[in-house]
Image: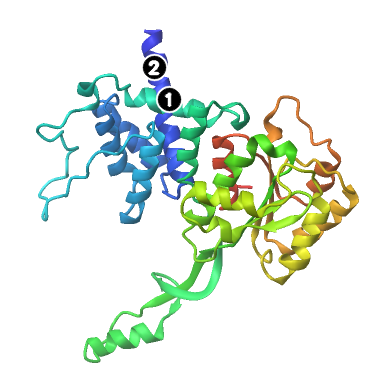
Amino acid sequence: MSTVRTATADGTAGVVGFARALRAAGVPAGPDRVAAFLAALGRLDPGRRRDVYWAGRLTLCGGPDDLERYDRVFAAFFDGERPPRRVRPAARPVRPPAVPRAEPGERTTEEEGGGPAATALASATEVLRHRDVAVLTAAERAQLNQLLAVFALDGEPRRSSRRRPARRGGVDPRRTVRELLRRGGEPAVLLRRAPARKPRRVVLLLDVSGSMAPYADALLRFAHAAAHGSRGRTPTEVFTLGTRLTRVTREMARRDPDAALAAVGAAVPDWSGGTRLGETLRAFLDRWGARGTARGAVVVLLSDGWERGDPALLAAQMRRLARLAHRVVWANPRKARPGYAPLAAGMAAALPSVDAFVEGHSLGALERLAAVVRGADGA
């Protein structure tokens, strides 16, 4: 009995981790949808990949825009397997669609032989989510890269000067007049509008010094996904910090992550060198930040906080940054280590100007970082 309970608990943890990965990719898979997903799996076979796929697709996706992201996350989360072939719904369904059965001649995962159960794959991926990036094997890094590729990093929403149709708000005179003309002058309901909301700009400052070498590849892939996965029109800006400042937003524009990282490696002259956070941050603020890049943005520093320069300079520049940015977030991969305390001179100097201090050592930590950036952390 205990073995069955343990297996069930592992499977539940796996599918909940899958829902977290969907949220990190921009699919609003909230607790109510996760509960519906688990209930659907209780009526199906959670060991069949096809049942898991359709149960999640019908319960976790909120609209057509979520389907592509769902497919990509599913393929990455369940060991890189291709998602099942889509079945086109009937033109006029007369009853709620059931989970489709396998087509004639199609072989299931169990019939193919050797394929582990979907819940076992989910549990293995859930374990990977919490492992330190620095100690992963080559196979685990390959799977991690697939999961990082589906990240989305939207900034916290803000009110825009544009207006959108709404049920409540001020009267929209143009739409109301057009509706009156369409009705031939007959009285019509007053149509209303409200301020639209758009995500704030996100600025990523990545430490590429020697002390950050074990995490550099994963964090750069995270930045690449952030640059391509945002739903907002404002592009994500990416800079590297070391002994000098380098803007790599153009290099990150390449769709292929491997090609983008190769371009970044060629563009960054101080790779795995020293750390002068105060000087490089001052260069960022003088040339980019004060001119608008950081103004009202969510600025994320991914660094362990080791500083070879003057900590007082770093403290002063962090205060400048805090005055410009809407929010300053610091992600430190070493924060998760047992007994960690921000005693390094650079980290201690920066913390008073930081709005959120989070971990950055694992996939799960980066998912929490994404939640902080979009303002869903409650902090």
From the top left corner, tell me how far across and down residue 302 is, in percent. Answer: 68, 45
Q: What's the residue at 50%, 25% (across, down)?
A: 127
Is the Cβ of the residue at disc 2 closer than 8 Å to that at disc 1?
no
Disc with the residue nearer the chain's start (2 vs 1): 2
Look at the numbered disc 2 and give the secondary structure of its residue: helix
For marks 2 and 1, give the CA distance: 9 Å
View extreme (front): residue = 266
**Residue 94, relative to residue 45: is it above or below?**
below
Front: mark 2 or 1: 1
Q: Quadrant of the N terminus?
A: top left
- Residue nearer the viewer, 143 or 360: 143
Q: Which residue is mark 2?
A: 7
Q: What's the residue at 50%, 48% (across, down)?
A: 257
View extreme (top): residue = 1
Q: Is residue 178 left or right of residue 16?
A: left
From the top left corner, tell me how far across and down residue 260 is, in percent. Answer: 54, 52
Q: What's the residue at 38%, 19% (across, down)?
A: 8
**Residue 290, relative to residue 5: is it above or below?**
below
Q: Quadrant of residue 29?
A: top left
Residue count near mark 1 (Cα–Cα under 10 Å), binned few <14, some 14–19, many ≥20: many
Residue 252 seen in this snapshot: yes
From the top left corner, tell me how far across and down residue 310 is, in percent. Answer: 90, 49
Look at the numbered disc 1 and give the secondary structure of its residue: helix
User: How was this image coloured?
Assistant: rainbow
Q: What's the residue at 35%, 80% (across, down)?
A: 190
| Amino acid type, residue under disc 1 in the picture | Ser
Q: Which mark is residue 123?
A: 1
| Amino acid type, residue under disc 2 in the picture | Ala
From the top left corner, tell me how far across and down residue 152 is, in percent. Answer: 49, 50
- Residue nearer the viewer, 225 or 159: 225
